[in-house]
Amino acid sequence: MADVIHMDFTLLPTISRFGISLGYGEKTVEEICQKYSVNVDFFLEVINSFHDKNYFPEKKFRAFSLKYIIDYLKSAHKFYLEYKVPKIERLIEKLIEVSDLEKQTFLLLKNFFQEYVNELKLHVKREEEEVYPYIINLEKSFLEKKITKKLQEKLQVYTIGQYQKEHGNIEEKLFDLKNILIKYVPMQKNNNLCNNILSELFKLEEDIKEHSEMEERVMIPQVKAMEKALKNGKFEVEEI
C-alpha cells in the first residue's frame, strides 16, 4: 500500500474515504483492505479511476453492490463539507485580510463561494436524506425478490429518472468562481495565496466531476434496471 502513495500521493484523500489511515507498514493493498473491511476489488477500481483520468470501468463498477457505491459517495460528501470547503473558506478569508487593495472583488469572491457552498449542501442533503435511502431499499427488494407495498406505491409516482432530470450541475458555479480569480482579481504583491485558492478550486472541481460520473454512469443506470425489474417482475408484495 505504501508503494501506491509513492506512485501517486494525490490518492491520499481518496484512500482516506474508505476509512483507511496512514501507518500501512509493509502490508499489501489486500491486507490493508481486509484490516478495514473494505472490498479490495472496489477499492482498486476507484483508485485506478482517480489515478488515470482516462480509466472509468463502468461495467466493472456496475457489478458491485450499490451500497458500496453509496457509502463511497457519502464519504466524498463528508470530505467536501468537512475538509475541502472549510479549507477554501479560510484561504479566501486570509486573502481579504492581507490585501491592501480594493476589497470589493474579494468580498464578491467570498459571497459567490458561499452561494456555491449553500447549493452544495442542499444537493448533499437531498441525496443523503431522500435519494440514497430510496436506492438502498430498492436494491434490497430486488435482491430479496420482495417488494413492500410502500415501495410499490412509490414506484408509481417516483423514479430515479426524475432525480436525474433535476440533478443540477454543481460544477458550473466553480467554473465561474475560477474565472473571477483568473480574470478579475487585482494584482497582488504576492500571488501565492490567489494561486493556492485557484489550485484548491480546480482540485475540488475535478473531484466533484468524478463524483458525478459515478452517479450518472454507474448508480443511475443500475437503479433504472432495478426499477424496471421491480415494476415488470412478479415479486412477492409485503404489506408493510
Image (cartoon, rainbow, N blue to C red):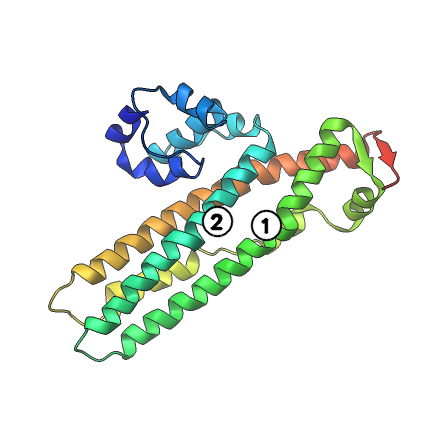
As drawn, which residue projects farthest toward the right? 239
- The kind of secondary structure element at disc 1 is helix
Is residue 217 rendered to the left or right of residue 198?
A: right
Asked whether disc 1 touches disc 2, contact meaning CB atoms under 8 Å apart, the reply is: yes
Is residue 165 rendered to the left or right of residue 36?
A: right
Query: Can see residue 55?
Result: no
Q: Is residue 48 above or below residue 200?
A: above
Mark 1: few/some/many CA within 10 Å (<14, 14-19, 20+): some
Q: Which residue is mark 1?
A: 128
Q: Where residue 163 sits in the image (x, y, percent)?
A: 63, 51
Amino acid type of the residue that numbered disc 1 sits on in the rendered structure: Glu
Q: Which residue is mark 2?
A: 77
Q: Quadrant of the N terminus?
A: top left
Q: Quarter of the image holding residue 25?
A: top left
User: What residue sits 45% from the left and 28% below the top?
Assistant: 43
Amino acid type of the residue that numbered disc 2 sits on in the rendered structure: His
User: What residue sits 30% from the left and 27% below the top?
Assistant: 4
